[in-house]
Image (cartoon, rainbow, N blue to C red):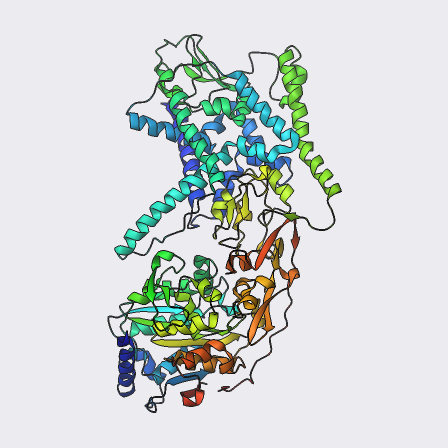
Amino acid sequence: MNTRRDFLKAGLALGATYPLLSVRGLLAAAPVPPAAPPAGQPILVAVRDGSRAAMLDRAMAELGGMAAFVRPGQTVVIKPNISFDTPPERGSNTHPELLRRVVTLCFAAGAKSVSIFDHTLDPWQRAYAASGAGQVAKETGAQLVPGNDASYYREVAIPGGVVLRSARVHSLVLESDVWLNVPVLKDHGGAQMTAAMKNLMGVVWDRRFYHRNDLHQCIADFLTWRKPALNILDAYHPMVRNGPHGRSEADLVEMRSLLVSTDSVALDAAAARMLGLTPATVRYIKIAADMNLGTMDLDQVDIRRIKLG
Amino acid sequence: MANRGLKLLRAGVALVVGATLTAALIDFRSLLPASVGRWLASIQFIPSAVALVTGASLSLACVVILAVTLTAGRVYCSAICPLGILQDVIARLIAWVRRQRRFLPFAPPARRLRWFIFWATVGGVAAGWAGLTLLLADPYSNFGRIAGDIFRPVVILANNAAAGLGRLAGVGTLYRVEPSWAGTGALLEPALLLGLLVVLVAWRGRIYCNTLCPVGTLLGWIGRRAAFRLTIDAGSCTKCIECLQVCKAQCIDLRRRTIDVSRCVACYNCLGACPNGGIRHRFAWTRRPSPRPAAPPVRAAAAAVADPQRRAFLADAAVALAAVVSGPGLRAQAAAALAPAVPEISAAICPPGAVSVDRFLARCTACHLCVTACPTQVLRPAGWEYGIAGLMKPRLDFARAACTYTCRSCTEVCPDGALDRLDLADKQVTRIGQAHLELDRCIVKTKGTDCAACSEQCPTQAVTTVPYGQNLRLPRLDPELCTGCGGCESACPVLPTKAISVTGLRRHGRARRAADSKAAAPVPAGGFPF
C-alpha cells in the first residue's frame, strides 16, 4: 500500500532534479525552474488568471511535469467531478478544457491508457455527455468507463477508518497504476464545500453509508485507505452557493484559479479559503488533519502562488 | 409472379415496422431518436383513435386505417399491427421447431365470442372505463408490454453477459444496464398474453386476431364490405388446397370456394400459392346496388333498411360511438364540478405532460413506450397504486430513481396523447408532485451529523440547507420551487421511512422559477486568500 506513496515521493524528488524532460509542451510554459520544497512540507501550487490549460501547464511545471507522476507504459485513471447533467458553463462539473489538458499531459508522459469515470448523481450517459467529458474522451483517446454499475466495484478493507471500515471501490482505482483526482470547487449544502476529498466519494459504490454514518468522518476515513497521486482543482468559476447542484450560472463567481497538490487536505484547506471559509470549520478537513492525513495549516505548506498574464 | 409481389410487400413492411418498433421498445441505450418509436406507435389504430377522439391531436392514422380497410381489407392486421406481426414470427418459430408448417383447415368463425368481446369493449369505453378497456383491447399496447416488459429485460440480460465477456477481453463498447422488470402484477398480463399467443398460434393460427381482438373484429366488419376483396375464381380453382396450406386465418372455405374476408388478415400468402392464379382482388362494390359502403358506417345505416340485424347493429354502434365520445367528457365535467379547490393528492405520481391523473388514466393504453424511453427507469408500470383503472400504467417510483430535470423523453414518445409533448422549459416547471420534509426523521436532527443528500439532488434547489446546531446544515424546503421530481426522496438515506418524500398531485401544477441575482464574491477578487 505504501508503494504508491513511495513512488510519488520518488517521483517528486525526481521531478525536482530532472524536470520537464518528456513533456515538450511544458517547456515554454515553465519560465521559472522548480524550486526544491523545504523538507517535509507539502507543495501546493496555486495559479491564477490564465486559461485552464495554461494554468495547469504552469502548475505541473512547478511539480516537475506530469512525467513526475505518470511513467511511460502506466495506466492512469482520472476521477473528475462529472456528476451532473449540466453544461460546462454551469460549473457543476470539472470543466472539459481542464480535463482535456490533463488527459493530454498523461498521454504525453507516455501513459499506456487513460480512463475517466465518475459515479454520477444524474444518469451517467447524460452527465458524461453534458459535462463535455464524452467529447474529451473522443478527442483524446481516453476511455470513458461507467461508474453507475455495481459490478465495477470491489470491496476493500479500510483498516484506518473510524466509521468507514470497508467500502466498494471502483475497480479502475484498484487496477490503474496512477490515480488522478480532478475535482471542481463548489459550495456544498451538506459537506459545506466540495473539492478534493469530497470528490473521492465518487469512487465508492454505497454513498448512502456516508450520509447515514457521519458524512465528514467517512470522507476523511476514505483517505486512510489510499490517496490519489495528485489533486488538480478546477477553481475557475467556483459555485459559491446552491451547491453542489447549483441552480443557474448566477451561482458562480469567476476566480480564474487552479490549485494542484499531492496533499488533499492542504488543497481543501486552501480551497476553503477561496470560498471564504475557515478550513478548521469544515469538519472533514479538520478530521483529516487530526488523523494526520495531510496538512490543514497552510503555514506549514509550501505554497507556490503564481499569477499568469 | 405478380401474385407473390403483394405478399413480399406485406412481409417487407411488416418486417420493417415490427423490427423497428421492437427495437424502439428495447432500446436501452437510447440509440434511436424518440421520433422513431413515437411515429410507429402513432400510426397504430387505437392510439391514433384515442388521440383523435380525445382531441389530443389531429391523429388521422385511424381514419386512414379505416379507409384502407374499406378499400382493400385488413391490411393493418398483417403489415402494421405489431401483435399480428409477432404472431407471424411465433408461427415461423413454431414451424422451425417442428420442422414443418402446420396445416390449418377452414374453420367456421366464432361469431358470438367475437362480437361479445367487441361489444364488451365498446360497452367498457361507453361506461367511462376507456382507460382500462382499451389497454386490454389494443393489440399495439399489448405488444408494447410484451416487448417492453419481457423482451427488453431479456435482451438487457444478454447485453450484460456480453458486456461482461467484453470487459474480460478488454473491449469497452458494451456496458451493463440494470434490467428493469415490471412488478409481478404488471408483468403477469404480458407474460400470460405471450403464453396465450404461443398456444393459440400453434393451435389455430391467427385466431387471436380473428376472435379475441376487438380491433380485428371492427376491421373485419369493415373489410367484409371492402371495395376490393380477395375472391376465389371458381373457374380456375381445382380445390388443390395449396391456398389452405398457407392460410393462417382459417378463412378459406374451399367447399364453397369462398373467403371469409372478415377474418382474412391480408397476408396474401394464398395469392402466390395458387398454381392457377385463381385468388385475386376483385372490385366488389359493383355487384350490389346498395348499400354503398363508401359512406361511413353510420350513414350507411339509412341505406341498409332491408337488413334489420344490420340496422340494430348500426344503431348500437351509433349509440356506442356517441357514448365513447361524450362519456369520458361528461365524467370529466362532473368530476371537475365536484373537485375541491385545493389540489388533491394522488397515491401514484403520473408523468409530466399528463396534466391530471384523471385525464392520464382515461387516455393511456399502457403501451410502455414511455417506460422504456425513461433513462432512469423511474417510470414503472403501476400495480394498484392508481386503482384498477391504472393497472400497468406508468407511474414514477422514487424508491430508487428520480425524474431527470433535463429529460422529457416520456412526453416525446406518447402516441395516445396521454402525455402532452412538453418542451424542456415547460417540463422544468411542471409540478407532478410535492415534496414534504419531515425534519424529525432527518439524519441531521436524529444523529446530529451532516447529510443533505436531498439538497444535493434537487435541480431547482427547492431543498437547500440552513445552518443548524453545532456547525450543521439542516434541509429546508421551499414548496413553491418544487417540481416533484423525486430527487430528494430517492437520495434520502433514512430508513425505513424517508425523511423527505413526494406526494402525487391529482392535477399537475406549475412550480415557480427562482430568479437569482448574481452571487457575491466570497473573498476579494484578484489575489490568493491564503
Residue at x-position 43% and y-position 70%:
A218
Q: How many marks?
A: 0
Residue A88 location, x and y as percent? 49, 68
Residue at x-position 52% and y-position 36%:
B43
User: Could you say which quadrant of the image residue A276 lies in?
Assistant: bottom right
State the quadrant of the N terminus of chain B. top left
For residue B160, say whether it is visible.
yes
Residue B282 location, x and y as percent? 48, 16
For residue A23, say whether it is visible.
no
* Residue B530 position (above or below residue B100): below
Residue B141 location, x and y as percent? 51, 36
**Is residue A17 shown left or right of residue B481?**
left
* Residue B362 position (above or below residue B314): below
Furthest residue in direction front, as rendered: B446
User: Could you say which quadrant of the image residue B390 lies in?
Assistant: top right
Residue B450 location, x and y as percent? 52, 70
Q: Closer to the camera, A53 or B330? A: B330
Residue at x-position 40% and y-position 76%:
A232
**Is residue B474 shown left or right of residue A74?**
right
* Residue B512 position (above or below residue B250): below
Furthest residue in direction left, as rendered: A73
**Is residue A166 shown left or right of residue A17?**
right
